[in-house]
Amino acid sequence: MAGIALSGFSNLFNSGSILAAVMSSSSLPLLSLSQQAAYMQNQMQEINYIYNQSMSVFSTMMGFVLNPVTGSMTAISSNSYVLNAIATPNTAPGTYNITVQQLAQPEISLLGSFSSANTQLGQSGTISLFFRSDTSSSGITDNNLSATTPGVQEFNITYNGTNTLQDIVNEINNTAGSDVTASIFYNGNTYSLMLAEKQGASTFTTSPSTTQHVIVAEDSSGIFTQNYIQNAQNAVINFGGASVTSNVNQIQNVISGVTLNLSGTGSVILSISQDTSQVANNVSNLINEINNILTPINVLTEKPGTYPSQNSLTSANPFIVPGDFMGNFMLTNLKTQLLSVVQPLENLGVVNYNYQTGQLQFDSNSFQNLLSTSSQTVLNSVTAFVSSLSQAIMNIISPNGALMTEENNISSNYAYTENQIYQMQQSLLLQQQQLQLQFSQVEAVMASSSAEITKLQTLLG
């Protein structure tokens, strides 16, 4: 009797390929969610790029707080050999007549006469240095000074026969260096100890006198005889009919916000005016900074290829996808705000928006010409521009501003999507485990059936 062919029954069921097909189909929603998450993550990166460009504008404007965009104040002296001046931004412009009657100078004296600065003195003794630190002792003559005299400090410098002139200089500077400067003076023939009042060390000054000095030295051995070669005096200037004195050659706020640096005597005319030399450069920098914000906004909100700046921007920042925010109200409104802040400059005719490039253009030459003919009008327009820009930038970078609100919304949706992805991954994992169990059971049944078929075939011969 002919045999009945029942072989190959178990090969009809391939659980691996069936499981892969089922899981691939079930994973399609997960793939879609993952693509959405990647898209939102990229959008947050794009918004963060615009935020960083806005922060750059903010940093530039903070620099103008110290160096105002409308120009600082400049002070010009008619005779720089007599005085120079520095004016702060809040100084009032004007012209001032100033006469420098005398310069401040410290008292200087010479002590002793020696053949060398490093030869041993050969004698022992003590130099008592008396320093008048204020005017309390102004009525007391030099030979009546002591450590107990009001307004007087005493320093004792002890030396012996092995010490040199240089040793004395070092000891005085170590002991009395905050008030007195010691050095060696060489006249081409001999060396002397030179003592000088530190500039501004005291307010005690004298007219040329043989009885009152700032620094008085009394030497017990007699080898350091003191000879005064320059008396101390205050600087004196005449301003507005009044005399002003100072113990240094720098006088502040005689004119509010102005520092006078004295270098000679005589009369000068000091002119204080606004320095506009950097205004055009400052405005140009701000316009460039605004363009750095407009460029990514244009590329993200318009269809790809609209603006020529697209290629350079995406090449340097591959995460920026042209058209990624096409039709987005927030970014479109942000662009409108930025263009509105330059209105004061557009009214002057020095700034215009190029619709082909999507960039603001600044005409520096026209700006300079207007500045030279109508400076106050131009400066007022610049001030209005900076004020509007400042407000716009603060709104952009504010934690509650439109930019951060948009990023927070995307971030919230991203977190929700990530949670959905996790839940779906867990569900798919459970489904896979269940299918694997079911398929293994089917395979076991089919394996058993295959064995029975084999037996039947054997019996049937």
Image (spheres, grey):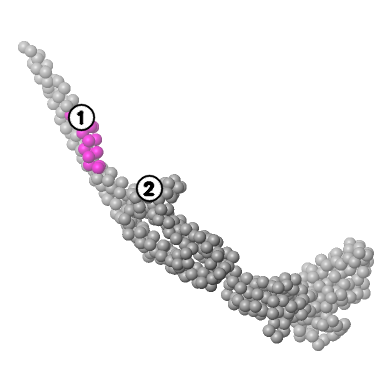
Vertical placement of residue 157 versus 443, above or below: below
305 or 41, nearer to the observer: 305
Residue found at x 7% / y 13%? 2
Are the residues tagged 2 and 1 within 8 Å (C-beta)? no
What residue sits right under mark 1 in the picture? 14
Instruction: Tell me how many marks there are.
Output: 2
> Rounded to the nearest whole Å, what is the CA distance between mark 2 and mark 1?
51 Å
Q: Please give the label number shown on residue 314.
A: none
Q: Is residue 127 left or right of residue 85?
A: right
Kind of residue at disc 1? Asn
Tell me the SS state at disc 2: loop
Residue found at x 55% / y 64%? 368
Disc 2: CA contacts within 10 A as few (<14), some (14-19) or many (>=20): few
Q: Is residue 38 magenta?
A: no
Vertical placement of residue 338 versus 81, above or below: above
Tell me the SS state at disc 1: loop
- Residue 83 visible to an observer of this rendering: yes
What x and y, as percent, mark residue 106?
Answer: 79, 75
Which badge, 2 or 1, comes first in the chain's sequence?
1
- What is the magenta range? 13-28
What x and y, as percent, mark residue 295?
Answer: 42, 54
Q: Nearer the viewer, mark 2 or mark 1?
A: 2
Vertical placement of residue 274 versus 411, above or below: below
- Residue 296 visible to an observer of this rendering: no
Q: Quadrant of residue 158?
A: bottom right
What residue sits right under mark 2 in the picture? 305
248 or 124, nearer to the observer: 248
Disc 1: CA contacts within 10 A as few (<14), some (14-19) or many (>=20): few
What x and y, as percent, mark residue 7?
Answer: 14, 20
Q: What kind of secondary structure does the magenta stretch mostly adopt?
A: helix
Task: Tell me the quadrant of the picture where the C terminus can be found.
Answer: top left
